[in-house]
Structures are given as structure tokens and as C-alpha cells.
Amino acid sequence: MGVTTVVEVLEALRSLSKEERAVLWEKLVDTPEIGEEIEDIATILERRDEPSRPYAEFVSELRGKNSLLLQQKSLGKIWDSPEEDVYEL
């Protein structure tokens, strides 16, 4: 879909009545592949102001509790960072 088409779609959406937009959103949410995307976006928007912390800090905390390491051992895999590949144990 080109930029022009996206702009046209947005303009068409703006022209819908409140009731028409409600029906459209309901149908979008009920469409599995689109509904999942909408839920993901809603979650991101809800959490965007929450404090964040480095991934390594999060992993260290979980490893300190042994929960991540135990889960990884049961799966036979280990992750050191989100950018790294999965390594077999």
C-alpha cells in the first residue's frame, strides 16, 4: 500500500460517523490477525509512560531468582540478550 493510499484511507476514516467508526473498530478487533495487532498497540500505548530498565538488569534479577535459568534449562536453551541467537545447552 503506497503512501497516497494510506492518506486516502485515513481521510476516509475521518469522514465516518462515530457509529460507523465503532462498527469498523468492532470488525477490526474481531479479525484475528488485525485484532492481535490492535491489542499489541493498545498495550504499548498504555505502558509507554511506565518506567523502563535495561534488559541486562531484568535478566540478572530473574537469574538471581533462578526462575529464568530453570525455565531455560527445561527448554534446553539459553538467551543472554534479546539481540543474541538462542544457544542449545
Image: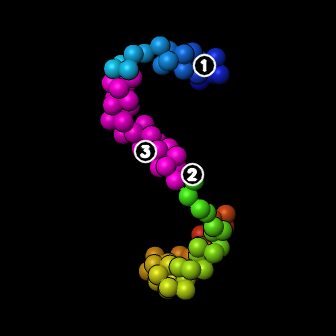
Q: Using the numbered discs, state the Cα–Cα distance from disc 1 to disc 2 in whole angstroms.
A: 26 Å
Residue under circle 1? 7
Contact (Cβ within 8 Å) of mark 2 with mark 3:
no
Residue under circle 3? 39
Contact (Cβ within 8 Å) of mark 1 with mark 3:
no
Residue at image x 46%, y 44%? 42
Q: Quadrant of the C terminus?
A: bottom right
> What secondary structure predominates along the stretch shown in magenta?
helix
Mark positioned earlier in the residue sequence (1 or 3):
1
Residue at image x 56%, y 80%? 61
Residue 48: give its label: 2
Q: Look at the numbered disc 1 and give the secondary structure of its residue.
A: helix
The answer to whether residue 87 is visible is: no
How many C-alpha atoms fall within 10 Å of the one at disc 2: few (<14), some, or many (≥20)? few
Q: Look at the numbered disc 3 and give the secondary structure of its residue.
A: helix
Q: Which residues are magenta?
A: 21-48
Q: Quadrant of the N terminus?
A: top right
Q: Position of residue 75 (x, y in %)?
A: 46, 76
